[in-house]
Amino acid sequence: MSTSGAPQTSGGKDILLRVRGLKRYFDVSQPLLNRLLEGKPRQILRAVSGINFDIQRGHTFALVGESGCGKSTVANLVVGLYRPTAGTIEFDGQDLAKLQRRSELAAIRRKMAMIFQDPYASLNPRWRVFNIISEPIRAFGLLDDKQAIIDRTAQLLTQVGLSPQDGQKYPHEFSGGQRQRISIARALASDPQFIVCDEPTSALDVSVQAQILNLMSELQQRLGLSYLFISHDLAVVRHMADRIGVMYLGRLCESAPADTLFENPRHPYTRLLLDTIPDIEMTGRKRVPVAGEIPNPIDPPTGCAFHPRCPRVTDVCRRERPHLRPVADGIMVACHAVDAPDHLSGSQAAG
Amino acid sequence: MSEPLLNVAHLRIEFNTRRGTLVAVDDISFDVMPGEVFGVVGESGAGKSLTGQAIIGLLEPPGRIAAGEIRLDGRRIDNLPYGQMRRLRGRQIGMIFQDPLTSLNPLYTVGRQLVETIQTHTSMNHEEARRRAVALLEDVGIPAADKRIDHYPHQFSGGMRQRVVIALALCANPRLVIADEPTTALDVSIQAQIILLLKQLCEQYDTAVILITHDMGVIAEISDRVAVMYAGRIVEIGGVREVVKNARHPYARGLMGAIPSLHRRVEKLNQIDGSMPRLTEIPSGCAFHPRCPQAFERCRRERPDLVRVGESQVACWLYGRTS
């Protein structure tokens, strides 16, 4: 069970990012006139509907889930590309929503960076790599001296396994893996403590993916970085994460230390994911594919969103939505069918 | 064993460009047995999709087959005239593409597309063809097939659309289906459904499959044998268990080690430094030698051929003949 070496996130630890009750809704209704004429109601897409998690300093928290589950929306909310509909995001003890002054915001933003999925789209093709990487340094006014910027950029390039001369080239001169290295160098330019990685390797080939994942682990150890790692690939997540949150239709259905999650998945959706994903282990056991497909997030099922696909579904699942509650030390599950030991079930009512 | 269903011998695919001739697939040979699932795996640019396109005769110019032969049931098919190739395509060889949205016509109902395909290849009348289309949709697991048949592709989800594409490929009961990244555009939980379906249908219809993918997990799940491609060449062919568990070629071994596993966690993933060479700058000798930890002098000079090592065939100077 949870006897593995993975850290347990509970009170009193050094929490870098604390997310509480985070929601983001998108209005996807037809225009007003169409609604009036056709008598259609407003349509709200609940991309993220109330999630909580903490990220400990120096650790990696991963969000996994299939497309449309809201994991990328969480990434964008955390770095401030979207404003939350409700909920709080605290970074290093400061509530991001309460920061009004530009200078305060900039000071926090400097400490956060983001790596995007597609290195072909995230780098400006008209800029030389040197300018791409040094932009955060200039934007935050970290260094004034031109030579100092050149030196810093050279150091960043070396750090990600490229050569300082590569700064004079344009992005199209690099392969996918090298471009992702450039993205990482740019993310590191402002000396951040925290990096949000949104599917950083899903556009890359496996051998290149291994290079980038190794580089990211190495940088984490050397620079003491914390990561929020978004991915749909459970094997990659297992390799990178200390703690994992599994998302389904805008909510967390399970959150646990990485090793525990893989050795003893508790939520039926986590189990099914682990059972069905093709793997090279070749255990030879028969796979039972998850029946059905992901429901439309505009019109989610009542009760537990997973109930139409769940093998352990009962009447209560169709009626009531289960809350995420602790079932063992450091393990949170949102499922009616998973029993909580008595001494932990006290917080259940609060939900 | 029986005769191979498909035999590819010394296939070479070239592209004529202003900067000279690029060799995208360089002298590859393999057999596919009847009813077998043959995996072709490699990273992007390895030439695996081109190989599939060449077999079904859909190589787009300026790409062309510059040398080699492709035989189906002993009959040469790489030099057939357009009309004959067209009759063979669909009837003998089916194709499943990566993106189900682009392989279905958005303006026609799936029923119309299925009926048209069935009638092209058989002498059925419209009623019979429609009944067969409903039966096919049921076979690929589409609920309420008799109603869904009159829906348009956009009314289906990604996984369901890929099922329709599989039904289309199996319409005329072909001997061979070429599936090019059939699950790459799908979500993980849907992937497993589609792979299992493909495997099960091919057993049911006794169809051989060439499964082209970059995802080793998918290959490990359903293939019987697998060919590993690198820079337009096959570096290793063998039984899937042999290749996954006991790869012999340094590239194949590196590739297997680079894949993170669900079942165990390693401190550091095995990484192959560098990246696959561009077509314009394929190294001399063995194309993998600049990245190979075990390369020696001969690897730089001479290109290794596939030689039998145990149950597998490997193209590497570490094995086989000593010159």
Image (tube, coloured by chain):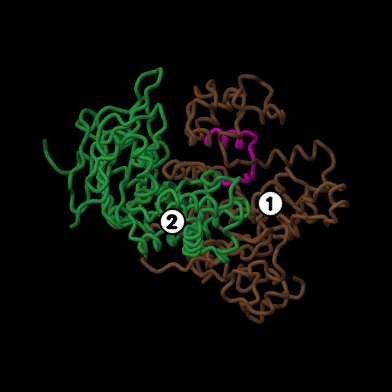
Chain colours: A brown, B green
Work out how far the residue at label 2 is from the one at label 1, CA to CA, in angstroms.
54 Å
Observer able to see residue A5:
no
Drawn side of residue B175 relative to residue A224, left or right: left
User: What's under tag 1, amino acid-wise?
Assistant: Val
Q: Return the x and y of residue B87 as percentages of the image width and height.
A: 37, 43
Where does the N terminus of chain B fall, quadrant-wise?
bottom left
Where does the C terminus of chain B fall, quadrant-wise?
top left
Q: Residues within 10 Å of mark 2 (few under 14, many from 20)?
A: some
User: What's under tag 2, amino acid-wise?
Assistant: Met
Q: Return the x and y of residue A300 as percentages of the image width and height.
A: 70, 63
Q: Return the x and y of residue A158 as percentages of the image width and height.
A: 50, 31
Q: Where are the magenta residues, as a range?
A: A181-199
Farthest residue, direction bottom? A342
Observer able to see residue B117:
yes
Which mark's residue is nearer the viewer, 2 or 1? 2
Could you tell me if the residues under marks 2 and 1 are in contact, i.e. CB atoms within 8 Å? no
- Give the SS element for disc 2: loop
Q: Residues within 10 Å of mark 1 (few under 14, many from 20)?
A: many
Q: Return the x and y of residue A91 as percentages of the image width and height.
A: 72, 49
